[in-house]
Amino acid sequence: MLGLEQARDTRLPEVTLETRFKPFVEDRLPALLTGRRGLIAHPGMPRACPRGIDEPTLLAIGPEGGFVDYEVARFEEAGCEGVHLGERILRVETAVTALLARLF
């Protein structure tokens, strides 16, 4: 909240913590992607994270070290594009800040 106040931004991002992957990716993700661009941030993906997008976006960020191969495949099957921030593995709290700053 303090960061939003300092930046004079009035859009609070919606953050969702999903504790069970399979029910999320099979039941909730398709509806969440309706009308949105889906991005999965994962080390080693072929595309760099885009800059300055202006469309509704769903961003999936996994644990340090990224998702397992099965999870990446399910996200891609659902229509998400894999993106990376470079070769270094970032802590989740650092990755969230870096991704949001780059995307928007």
Image: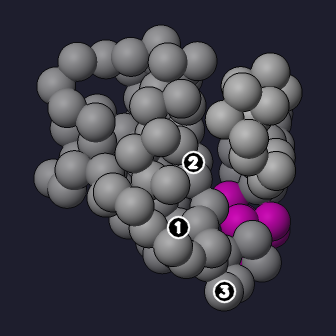
Q: Secondary structure at mark 2?
A: strand
Of 62 and 53, nearer the camera is 53
Where does the image place residue 51, in percent across and percent down from the top left? 33, 57
Q: Quadrant of residue 73?
A: bottom left
- Report the disc number at residue 60: 2
| Three-letter amino acid code at the position of disc 3 | Gly
Where does the image place residue 93, in percent across and percent down from the top left? 58, 18
Quadrant of the frame with the N terminus: top right
Residue tagged by mark 1?
Answer: 38
32 left or right, relative to 33: right
Label 3 to label 2, Cα distance in Å? Answer: 16 Å
> Is residue 41 something that shows in the picture?
yes
Residue at 44% from the left image edge and 31% from the top image edge: 98
Tag 3–tag 1 contact (CB < 8 Å): no
Q: Earlier in the sequence, mark 3 or mark 2?
A: 3
Where does the image place residue 9, in percent across and percent down from the top left? 73, 46
> Is residue 67 something that shows in the picture?
no
In this view, the residue farthest toward the top is 91
| Three-letter amino acid code at the position of disc 2 | Ala
Q: Is residue 78 above or below residue 91?
A: below
Give the number of marks: 3
Crowding at dot 1, Cα within 10 Å, few <14 / some 14-19 / many 20+, comes out as many
Tag 2–tag 1 contact (CB < 8 Å): yes
Q: Is residue 19 above or below residue 100?
A: above
Q: Is residue 26 magenta?
A: yes
Q: Is residue 16 above or below residue 104?
A: above
Task: Specify the segment rendered in magenta.
Answer: 25-30
Q: Earlier in the sequence, mark 2 or mark 1?
A: 1
Q: Is residue 2 magenta?
A: no
Residue tagged by mark 3?
Answer: 35
